[in-house]
Image: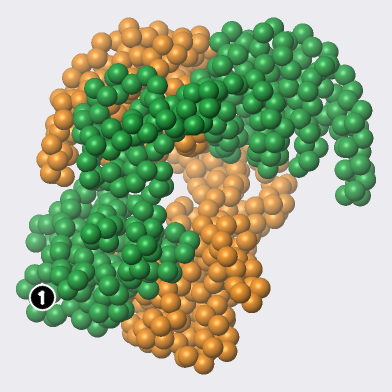
Chain colours: A orange, B green
Amino acid sequence: MKAEIIAVGTEILLGDIVNTDAQVISLGLDELGIDVYYQTVVGDNPGRLREVLDIAKKRSDLIITTGGLGPTLDDLTRETIAEAFGKKLVLHQPTLRRITAFFDQIGREMTQNNVKQAMLPADCKVLENNWGTAPGCAFEADGVHVMMLPGPPRECTPVFRTAGMEYLSKLAGGVIVSHVVHIFGMGESQMEDRLHDLMEKSVNPTLAPYAKDGECLVRVTAKADTAAQAEQLLAPAVQQVCDMLGDVVYGIDIGSLERAMAEVMTEKGLTLSVAESCTGGLLSKRITDVPGASKFYKGGACTYCNEIKMKVLGVKKETLDKYTAVSTQTAGEMARGIAQAYGTDIGIGITGYAGPDGGEDGTPAGTVHIGIFYNGETQVRTIHSPRGRENARRDAANHALDLILRAAKK
Amino acid sequence: MKAEIIAVGTEILLGDIVNTDAQVISLGLDELGIDVYYQTVVGDNPGRLREVLDIAKKRSDLIITTGGLGPTLDDLTRETIAEAFGKKLVLHQPTLRRITAFFDQIGREMTQNNVKQAMLPADCKVLENNWGTAPGCAFEADGVHVMMLPGPPRECTPVFRTAGMEYLSKLAGGVIVSHVVHIFGMGESQMEDRLHDLMEKSVNPTLAPYAKDGECLVRVTAKADTAAQAEQLLAPAVQQVCDMLGDVVYGIDIGSLERAMAEVMTEKGLTLSVAESCTGGLLSKRITDVPGASKFYKGGACTYCNEIKMKVLGVKKETLDKYTAVSTQTAGEMARGIAQAYGTDIGIGITGYAGPDGGEDGTPAGTVHIGIFYNGETQVRTIHSPRGRENARRDAANHALDLILRAAKK
């Protein structure tokens, strides 16, 4: 089956945003064994969209569009597709009820233009959107499968990965099952080097390594007639990947470092608090991204000036004077200080130069010290992450989570 | 001039990488006043690339390709384009010398397949690549302008932004200038409802509204012969949008609520601290996303259990017992408590049910109270954001930033 992804959005053509939806969908179609031959971006212009659809109809078996499903005047994907495939748009009552209820709930008036989001091609399969107002939908016409998805990545990704992929897996035939091996503490090229021979000879399951948000992942995917058969193919391959990579593997299908950490902390009945300077609350935010974090996380302090580091965490004035706020010593005192102030088993202290500026003493931007206090002992890890403020903060939070995870596992 | 960007690369179709080159080029063309009508991605397949080129030739005046210029077997862009436009490939001696010198420099033997990177269409303009081996090039044929750029972003971006844009600026003529009006506190559909008539009749400047991360934006874009003339067209249109939307407009070209807030806080010389429960550090993280936040931000506390709310913020036990931790009363005491503990002019307190679970008393997930303490007074705003944990936390942080901004502006 040959697929084409069409993104509808002038904001992509203007360069305001990158077409990340296309990547998410391409990855999903790859998992399903569906080949993507083209990705196209066209503006919010019905004439040009129609031409693009006519080209796609001739060369593709499956067309997936993103965007243009919202309530505003320039959201014209639904109407243009219906016209191109000779489908009527009909009011989908359950969707209208859902949209009406949503506006009631947030206490805002629902303007009339929202109704058009509930107008869907007759006899389509509705792909429910629990992350926004406009639902997706899918149908077959003129021998082509068509799927429309909302454009905002926060809506497109979950709608596609749930209802969208479920719909497509029925078209694709057989089943595809994947497991993801999560890795922290090894670079992408080193990982690929280690797995190179295994990757070359793997046909089913296949191995796909990639890097994301400062971590690495290997997706192991098997095709079979049934899920059970796929799992049988997967088990030894996943084990082999884990064996080849060693203790940098922190979980299978676990989703993220914070989830892996939360699982172990909860299981061990340990408690945690964190003190952050340069990460500014990012670590605390990521810990509390995990529902149920309150089982082990008591809280944190963002100490963005020396005064608060001393007052809240008890960092010594002499330490700050002698070693500065960005030092292994300060990181260690922050970790111990928060654990004592908040009464927790484990305490974390993070201090560094996230950038754009480094220290006056010549310490480069991207230098971050991460202290951990546990069992009466303090340990500090120093990292260098020179690729901008956002990356430095993310990497520091990743290392802190890795430190907690390793301490809790012991 | 109508432009089309064609990326050649199977790795994009597999979802291994996002097509960021297209964004970089789109932004640059927008600056030059060249309209991008299409972005297309096609694999390393000469047959399909040829078809895509034939379509582009018919509908576009300028075709810019990225990728497929390397030394390996599947790099076929140069050959396919030469064929499509009836151009001969000839050896470009200066390029061959540069490539040979490059290999000498890194002490590696130049394999024979590298020579083909110096084969360029006859009579083309060579776009020098000082960041890699394959140069870009540009020519005109069959009434269409064609530009080829290397694919790796670290080569594509600088080659395009230097030699590429210089070449194109001669073709373009005229300029395009945009301003972005930032809006918080009004939904996309309501905004569009208010601006509907203005949008319909606007031709130059044009108005493009969109929603992003719980906020709304209106991009106002004008075309003119010079930047000054474009600004003259823009000024009254931007003013009109601001007048029609009222005080939900928080800035022009400011980037984000946190940046707008940081600007006003710094200007007014006010200081800030925040206490977070359900947002878990997200607000603090967003405040410190802004470089230089330390000028006004002293720090924050994530108080993820009652014990810490009482100990660190001085929230009264009676308040927690009588009204629970998720109440306007607790939010107010948190705001006052952090301002006093950290000694700041403004204090924020956030408490709520981010989800997936609501309160045991039936309070639905997505209910969040945001308290602000300023000038001895406490004010609390309650929001309902029922679309999942991530959105509820984002919306709560947005409202907190809005409260700070409005207080600081007074």
Q: Which residue is drawn at 50% across and 43% down?
A: A178
Q: Residue A346: x and y, percent?
A: 42, 80
Position of residue A219 in the picture relative to residue A255 (left or right): right
Does B360 sit above or below residue A86?
below
Q: Residue B403: x and y, percent?
A: 24, 58
Q: Residues within 10 Å of mark 1 (few under 14, many from 20)?
A: some
**Which corner quadrant of the image does residue B11 belong to?**
top right
Q: Which residue is drawn at 57% across and 57% down?
A: A388
* Quadrant location of the N terminus of chain B in the rendered image: top right
Secondary structure beneath dot 1 equals: helix
**Which corner quadrant of the image does residue B408 belong to?**
bottom left
Q: Residue B206: x and y, percent?
A: 38, 24
- The answer to whether residue A157 is seen in the rendering is no
Q: Which residue is drawn at 30% across and 24% down?
A: B199
Does B160 sit above or below residue A379?
above
* Quadrant location of the C terminus of chain B in the rendered image: bottom left
Does A53 sit above or below residue A392?
above
Query: Which residue is tagged 1?
Result: B319
Query: B113 or B171: nearer the eye?
Result: B171
Q: Residue B84: x and y, percent?
A: 72, 11
Position of residue A361 in the picture relative to residue A105 (left or right): right
- The answer to whether residue B311 is seen in the rendering is yes
Determine the chain carrying the residue at label 1. Answer: B
Query: B185 or B72: nearer the eye?
Result: B185
Report the amino acid beneath label 1.
Thr
Query: B389 or A224: nearer the eye?
Result: B389
